[in-house]
Image (cartoon, rainbow, N blue to C red):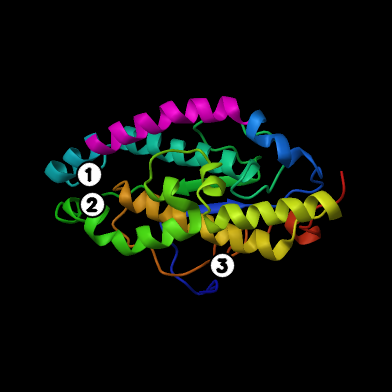
Amino acid sequence: MASDVGAPVYPLQLEGELTPPLSRWLWIVKWALAIPHYILLTFLWIGFAVVTFIAFWAILFTARYPRALFDFNVGVLRWTWRVGFYSYSALGTDRYPPFALHDDPDYPARLDVAYPESLSRGLVLVKWWLLAIPQYIVVAIFAGAGLAELSGAGDEVAIVNGGLIGVLVLIAGIVLLFTGRLPQSIFDFVLGMNRWVFRVVAYAALMTDDYPPFRLDQGGHEPGAEPSVGEAQGPEAAPA
């Protein structure tokens, strides 16, 4: 399930650039530093669920996802990914994530979803539960039961529930603590799993009709994307 450079571009684009130097110890307390984000994201994900419910009926009757509602849900996913990248979905940066729904091109974690001009009225009835069942199984392995339920944004859930992302990030954090470097191979693999999870979330939230590929696109950039200057110069973290 390796990344395929010639693979079709999926409507959800998730990227994350490892930004050294990383502190050896800061990751241990990021759960506390991120509490303000967790509180706000709890309410934002309640809004996400309400907006998705409204969008369901809008798509069913009009075959369109209202743009304002779509942009809000993209913003929630974007905010969630920035917090996860900072904390226990990747540990990819020590830069504190902004409190914003809009895109921040200067932040090392970015997410966007292409707006669909029209969506299938028939698929909206079945894709979020029946068609997505195989994907939910994969997500449960990657992110743990909490995120598999698509119920919220608490990235610490992946560790508590034993998701593979959480386990590998914990290992990477221990390596960082003793060596001052975050293993690039683990980072790339974790980014691929996060990318898969967010694609499934977007599909289940009715934001696209494109079925998420059973393909692990590893690394901080989408297939075919050019690496940034910072990544090209050396992605591994140096001692703090």
**Quarter of the figure with residue 183:** bottom right
Residue at the spot of label 1 = 64
Residue at the spot of label 3 = 224
Dot 3, crowdedness within 10 Å: few (<14), some or many (≥20)? few
52 is within the stretch colored magenta: yes
The circle on residue 119 is 2
Judged by its main secondary structure, the magenta piece is: helix
The circle on residue 217 is none
Task: Name the kind of residue labelled 2 in the image.
Answer: Leu
Dot 2, crowdedness within 10 Å: few (<14), some or many (≥20)? some
Dot 1, crowdedness within 10 Å: few (<14), some or many (≥20)? many
| Whether residue 94 can be seen here | no
Give the magenta part as a residue range.
Answer: 34-53
**Quarter of the figure with residue 105:** top right
Task: Name the kind of residue labelled 1 in the image.
Answer: Arg
The structure residue drawn at horizontal position 84% and vertical position 53%, both measured from the top left corner, is 178
